[in-house]
Amino acid sequence: MKKILAGCSILFLTVLALTACKPAEAPEADAAQAAEPVFKRAWVRSLPPGMKMTAGFGVLTNETDKAIELVSFASPTFQSVSLHQTQEIDGVSKMAGVDSLTLQPGETVEMMPGGYHLMMMGPRQSMAPGNQVLIQMTSAAGQTCEYEVAVENR
């Protein structure tokens, strides 16, 4: 009987130890997935034929517990995409490129006309309402996030 109990105890402890273990990759994979900002209510302004630039807007939120620094923006639909901010200086509205945008944990930044926005140059397809545009945002950590965004006439 003692041998059976000892065998059961060893088996129980072995199972307990194994169920407490997680693969080494799991926390890193979860952290990488969690480092993606949420991009809601996103849209790209429609363009009449022949126009060479438009803008993208939406609400970026960092729902993680770590800061996310966005350093690069792109789209296969455009020759170039960059982050800009419109500011009023001495009563004059001026637009300037922004090198990066850091979202602190829980922070939300609204990209809207007259504020932060994506400048999108050289469209490679029609920017008619109803079309879709893929927008890519790359973090300083090297993670690229992709968002399908509707073209709208606003």
Image (tube, grey):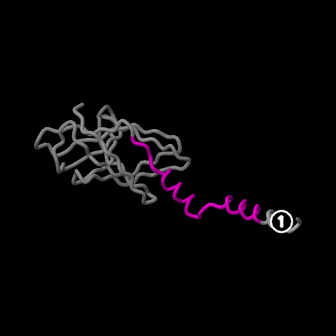
Question: Residue 116, how many percent across, how many down?
Answer: 35, 40
Front in this rendered view, residue 39 or 8? 8
| Outermost residue, left side | 50
Displayed quadrant of residue 111: top left
Which amino acid type is marked by label 1? Ile
In the image: residue 9, left or right of residue 69: right
| Outermost residue, right side | 2
Q: Is residue 30 magenta?
A: yes
Which residue is located at x 75 percent, y 64 percent?
11
Question: Residue 68, how many percent across, how many down?
Answer: 47, 50
Q: Which residue lies under the disc numbered 1?
A: 4
Which residue is located at x 11 percent, y 41 percent?
49
Disc 1: CA contacts within 10 A as few (<14), some (14-19) or many (>=20):
few
Displayed quadrant of residue 85: top left
Which residue is located at x 71 percent, y 62 percent?
15
Quarter the N terminus occupies: bottom right
Report the predominant secondary structure element of the magenta stretch. Answer: helix
Front in this rendered view, residue 3 or 84? 3
Q: Which residues are magenta?
A: 11-39
Q: Is residue 101 above or below residue 21?
A: above
